[in-house]
Image (tube, coloured by chain):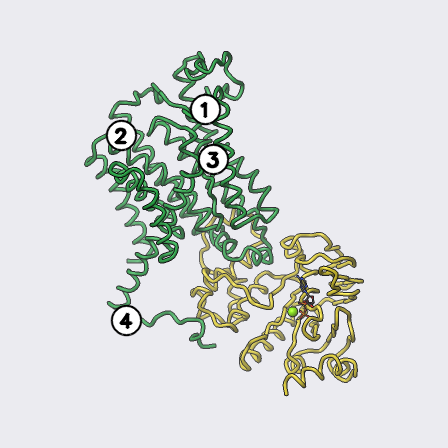
Amino acid sequence: MSARLRGYALFAGVAALFLVVAPLALPAFRLDELAKYLCFAIAALGIGLAWGQGGMLTLGQGVFFGLGGYAMGMYLKLHDAGGDLPDFMVWSGVDKLPALWKPFGNPVFALAAVVVVPVVIATLLGVLVFRQRVRGAYFAILTQALAAAFVILLVGQQGLTGGTNGLTNFYDFFGQDPEADSTQRTTYFVTAIVLGVLYLLARQLVKSRFGRLLVAVRDGEDRVRFLGYNPATVKTITFAISAGMAGIAGALFVPVVGIISPSLLDVVPSLELVVAVAIGGRYTLAGAVLGAVAMNYAKTSFSEQWADGWLYLEGALFIGVMTLAPRGAVGVYEQVRDAIARRRKPVPAPPTASEVPA
Amino acid sequence: MSALLEIRGLEVVFDGFRALGGVDLTVEQGELRFLIGPNGAGKTTLIDVVTGLTRPASGTVRFAGTELGGLREHKIVRLGIGRTFQTSVVFEELTVVENLDLAAGFRRPLPTLLRQRRGVSDTVAAALDTIGLGDLADRPAGVLSHGQRQWLEIGMLIAQKPRLLLLDEPVAGMSRDERDRTGELLTEIARDHTVVVVEHDMEFLRRYASQVTVLHEGKVLVEGDVATVQADPRVQEVYLGRTKKEAA
Ligand SMILES: Nc1ncnc2c1ncn2[C@@H]1O[C@H](COP(=O)(O)OP(=O)(O)O)[C@@H](O)[C@H]1O
Ligand SMILES: [Mg+2]
């Protein structure tokens, strides 16, 4: 079987697992939990593109996740309020709907904003920083600072954003009761399908000429300029795509979990996403997705027993992976697979630089 | 008609150190020009200025009538100037063909880059053939030997279809055989390209050069054909004498 066919077969298998087996085997509330992991996986997919393929270590994906989440939350709040003010505004003493909120009463506008707002902000940021050749650790710190600033902004504007509590207490998701099993199943399916579609699109991107160019920018940005490309453009486009994915993830998160709040998109959750991608294997999109699902599952299971321990375990795992297996779980799998293949059918090892005849 | 490349009064200063002190250089369409000079003479700096990597303190660089001052690197490439680096840089994770395809592709509109590459374009096939790496076409560039990397870089340069090629020490660190092959490669490329080669190696120069410019301490010392340059006592003093001593 060719590698291509094997890839499709694997994808079909995983899709069947998530779309048929999991819904049959799991009770609705577990399915809802899985949906939450899949939301994170969507954001992780974006990190896989930006960081794994493009070398942009983005520590502030929470910002875009939050923008998507709040866009969705604002629509749901306005819908619930039915022409009145959303409940938290009444409690904060706001007496008139802020202008910023008005267009979000329209579901089409809100859904578009889920993608457009993160993409536009990431593009502006990209144009500013990548043109100035800000990269590496400087870029990472910048994005992290952005996440911190975003949280401060959200918490400070109580009347506009719901402050620390964020947006929650939703009563109606597009005509469905949020508590009903059927709603949870529906949101699960929507999330799983969105993840699958985005994965295929991202994979197509990676395989395209643009994807090759992106890897070249990651490995030799300065060299790429002398091939006639502007690396800032390549990076900005990729960063914007990853922001759009985080926005979609945040928007799906709201119906799945029923809340969007500053603590969900702060520095630590943003970092945890990156850690999950590193552990899964950042150089493949599958690794990013796998890492996000596995780490969030582990976090939930582990936290039920020993809440404080999780962060230590996560940190230790991260350090272990970065030092021992920088290509993550997928990298380990690939090594084992290649080793087995070599033992089964002894092919000459690929020649190293010094062995290749001139 | 004006020359393809015209450099006038070029000065480059690094932290008070004058790396180039008023260089004039003219390269005509179709020429194969060798640029030589001892280490630190400013050869690489000269190429860096032409390709937008280093900003000059003063002076002008005109390419095909266009003033290059202030243009960013990729814009200069798009005008038709290609270069290689002293230490070759190829993209190790990409295959040989992918490296070439990338180099050939900058004229493609961005949306078409979203498509997957199918097969090998004529430009890439021709470049692959010229550099003789056909057998390694689908291997990652990371497995190439030093010499092969240099060839791949030259291939990427050809695939860019530039009007002017600037090669910075393409045979440095190569074995004898590799040098010979590179020399042939250069001669072949020079048939239908304008080429400037920075080279250190005197023997290589004797075999493949015709027009030579000698740079010394940031200034043009002598310019002429190989025999004239070699016979010039100043050149022997600053350059040839030194290499002879080094070689001994
Ligand atoms: N970026 C830089 N900063 C400071 N000095 C530099 C820089 N680049 C080159 N130089 C100096 O300029 C001089 C010319 O260097 P270079 O052009 O690399 O010489 P060549 O290529 O002829 O050996 C050298 O003395 C070198 O040390
Ligand atoms: Mg040099």
Q: Amino acid at mark 3?
A: Val
Letter of the chain that mark 2 sits on in the rendering:
A
Alpha carbon separation for disc pair 4 and 1: 62 Å
**Amino acid type indicated by mark 2:** Arg
Mark 4, mark 3: which one is toward the viewer? 3
Chain where mark 3 sits: A
Mark toward the viewer: 1 or 2:
1
Residue B126: x percent and y percent?
Answer: 53, 66
Rendering colour (chain A): green
The subunit carrying tag 1 is A
Counting residues from the start of the chain, the first of labels 1 and 2 encountered is: 1
Residue count near mark 4 (Cα–Cα under 10 Å), binned few <14, some 14–19, many ≥20: few
Residue in the picture at 72% in, 79% down: B239
Is A342 situated above or below A109? below
Please tell me which residue lies in front, B166 or A55. Answer: A55
Q: CA distance from mark 3 to mark 1?
A: 15 Å
Q: Nearer the viewer, residue B82 or A184?
A: A184
| Residue behind mark 1 | A163
Q: Quadrant of ligand 2?
A: bottom right
Circle on res. A346:
4
Q: Report the residue marked by disc 3.
A: A63
Residue A166: give x, y in percent of width and height.
42, 25
Numbered badge on residue A185: 2
Which quadrant of the view contains residue A21? top left
Q: Is residue A310 left or right of residue A96?
A: left
Figure colour of chain B:
yellow
Label 4 chain ID: A
Density class for disc 1 (Cα within 10 Å; few <14, some 14-19, many ≥20) is: many
* Mark 3 surroundings within 10 Å by alpha-carbon count, few (fewer than 14), some (14 through 19), many (20 or more): many
Q: Position of residue B42 (x, y in %)?
A: 71, 68
Q: Is residue B223 left or right of residue B195?
A: right
Of mark 2 and mark 4, the one earlier in the sequence is 2
